[in-house]
Amino acid sequence: MIIGVPKEIKNNENRVGATPAGVNELVRNGHTVYVQATAGEGSGFADEDYVRAGATILPSIEEVYGIAEMIIKVKEPIESEYNLIKEDQLLFTYFHFASYEPLTHAMIERKAVCLAYETVERPDRSLPLLVPMSEVAGRMSIQEGAKYLEKPLKGRGILLGGVPGVQPAKVLVLGGGVVGTNAAKMAAGMGADVTILDTNLARLRYLDDVLPANVKTQMSNGYVIRELVQTHDLIIGAVLIPGAKAPHLITRDMLATMKPGTVLVDVAVDQGGCIETCKPTTHENPTYIIDDVVHYCVANMPGAVPYTSTQALTNATLPYAVQLANKGWKQACADSNELKLGLNVVNGKVVYKGVAEAFNLDYTPVESVL
């Protein structure tokens, strides 16, 4: 198969779809890989590294899309890429369709085969291609939240871990999944007073067992959230419904009850956000303020640490990419239910129920396109 790795062009996105080691594995399996010039520079990989791995360097994004049967990316295509995508071309990347309707309609129109990292799902309901970036984003949410609690950045002016004789910051984590667990772990490690909420009692029991003593678990519901946001300094939104839009757990009216300088970090922004006042921001302009509450809603948080993120992502995606390249997408998805669940839009048809429901589109069972 002919595989293309274009340079990411979303604002401040420094990751790349494959490391040189990943490219080498695809080449060893008999495939041809084209990498756009300087695609890996932001992650610390030079063109020469890809050439040594067996890739061919192409100067432009147009040439990569023009020659490739499968495109391996990190972020969803943006508007300037839409017309580069060919009918029947396989795109293997993060899409988060349910949060952005224009992208969904564009991929339907291009009749591409869109296999989304975020909905590839194992039998135990885990999301193997979302996990590595969720781990990064969860840990970064605390790193960034701690920074924006500083007074010059309009935060409360509170040190996350406190000092002897002064209480630490109070951190509230909404969601006990991968993002929430990593956020709680980092906040606890920095000495904060942490509360983590979830609706799954079995998950809360597990978290109570494995997290440090300065992390408290509590069952999540609207009443509890409304009470807790009034007393916490840093609030992390870590909610995920696979392939669907995130629910608003923090509503507009709750902001007035928060302390001035409270920091909200909405890691769910890729899926529409779990904070009603959330809107996507970039690493260039990461925050905005509503009712004296700081909102950090960067849609590609792991893009700020691309050396770590690209390697973690390729570790997870490469086995699936090899299956797709070796067998072709139809056979690979027929053989692997995990990959089949990753199909979202195929040849103009929406084959993932959560995406169809988000925009009231016709839903086609995925089995009919295999």
Image (cartoon, rainbow, N blue to C red):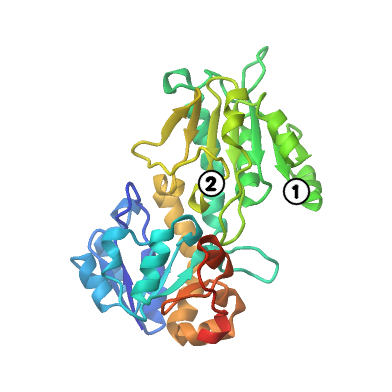
State the image coordinates of residue 262 (x, y, percent, origin top left): 56, 25
State the image coordinates of residue 241 (x, y, percent, origin top left): 62, 57
Residue at 30 percent of width and 66 percent of height: 82
Q: Secondary structure at mark 2?
A: loop
Q: Is residue 63 shown above or below 14?
A: below
Task: Using the image as rendered, state which of residue 356 and residue 92 is in the foreground.
Answer: 356
**Label 2: how many Cα within 10 Å (few below 14, some 14–19, many 20+):** many
Quadrant (top left/top right/bottom left/bottom right) for the N terminus: bottom left
Q: Is residue 58 left or right of residue 4?
A: left
User: Visible in this render: residue 56?
Assistant: no
* Location of mark 2 (residue): 273
Residue at 55 percent of width and 80 percent of height: 366
* Location of mark 1 (residue): 199
Specify the amino acid type for callout 2: Gly
State the image coordinates of residue 198 (x, y, percent, origin top left): 72, 46
Q: Is residue 264 left or right of residue 11?
A: right
